[in-house]
Image: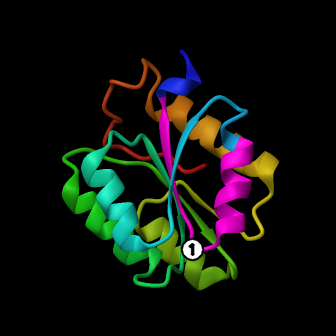
């Protein structure tokens, strides 16, 4: 299975964070699309085939939870999500898991953990390739 066939949306208001994620995921073989706001992330999902979302918990226009709700409303199938957050505490972890997120990574994001989480998620939810819809049952990372 060719990783380049998988599109990852990374939504973060920080250009440095976007660049860091892009600079780690592209060499790992993934196609990466960036968004700097919730509105932009929603538009990307509306107009492109995205396999996984890496979503900051706090964007300038909406919270990550609000954005993920909107994204899930656009789709008729599960779209895996990995949240990132400046502050990870019991509350943010609970919110992320209640949203059926795969995991929440603290910022600044450890690149090796991000690549591992993305790779694990892709292998878990798309075992037969990028055209397969992810199953509706969820597994925690």
**Image label count:** 1
113 and 99: which is toward the camera = 113
Query: In the rendered image, which quarter contains the N terminus?
Result: top right
Horizontal relation, residue 114 to residue 138: left or right: right
Q: Is residue 82 above or below residue 30?
A: below
Horizontal relation, residue 74 to residue 23: left or right: left
Q: How is the image coloured?
A: rainbow
The structure residue drawn at horizontal position 42% and vertical position 47%, both measured from the top left corner, is 138
The segment highlighted magenta reads 6-24
Q: Is residue 40 magenta?
A: no
The structure residue drawn at horizontal position 44% and vertical position 81%, both measured from the top left corner, is 63
Q: Is residue 17 magenta?
A: yes
The structure residue drawn at horizontal position 34% and vertical position 71%, both measured from the top left corner, is 39
38 and 15: which is toward the camera = 15
Give x and y (percent) for residue 16: 72, 66
Give x and y (percent) for residue 24: 74, 44
Give x and y (percent) for residue 129: 43, 20
Label 1 residue SS: loop
28 and 104: which is toward the camera = 28
Horizontal relation, residue 93 to residue 25: left or right: left
- Locate residue 50: give its quadrant: top left
Q: Which residue is mark 1?
A: 13
Q: Is residue 113 above or below residue 5?
A: below
The structure residue drawn at horizontal position 21% and vertical position 61%, both measured from the top left corner, is 73
- Locate residue 105: give its quadrant: bottom right
Give x and y (percent) for residue 80: 44, 49
């Amino acid at each position: 299975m060719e990783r380049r066939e998988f599109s990852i949306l990374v939504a973060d208001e920080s250009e440095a964070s976007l660049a860091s994620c892009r600079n780690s995921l592209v060499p790992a073989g993934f196609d990466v699309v960036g968004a700097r706001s919730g509105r932009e992330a929603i538009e990307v999902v509306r107009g492109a085939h995205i396999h996984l979302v890496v979503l900051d918990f706090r964007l300038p226009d909406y919270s990550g939870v609000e954005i993920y709700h909107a994204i899930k409303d656009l789709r008729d199938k599960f779209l895996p999500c990995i949240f990132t957050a400046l502050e990870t505490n019991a509350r943010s972890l609970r919110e992320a898991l209640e949203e059926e997120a795969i995991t929440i990574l603290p910022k600044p994001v450890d690149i090796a953990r991000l690549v591992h989480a993305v790779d694990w998620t892709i292998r878990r939810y798309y075992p037969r390739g990028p055209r397969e819809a992810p199953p509706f049952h969820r597994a925690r990372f």
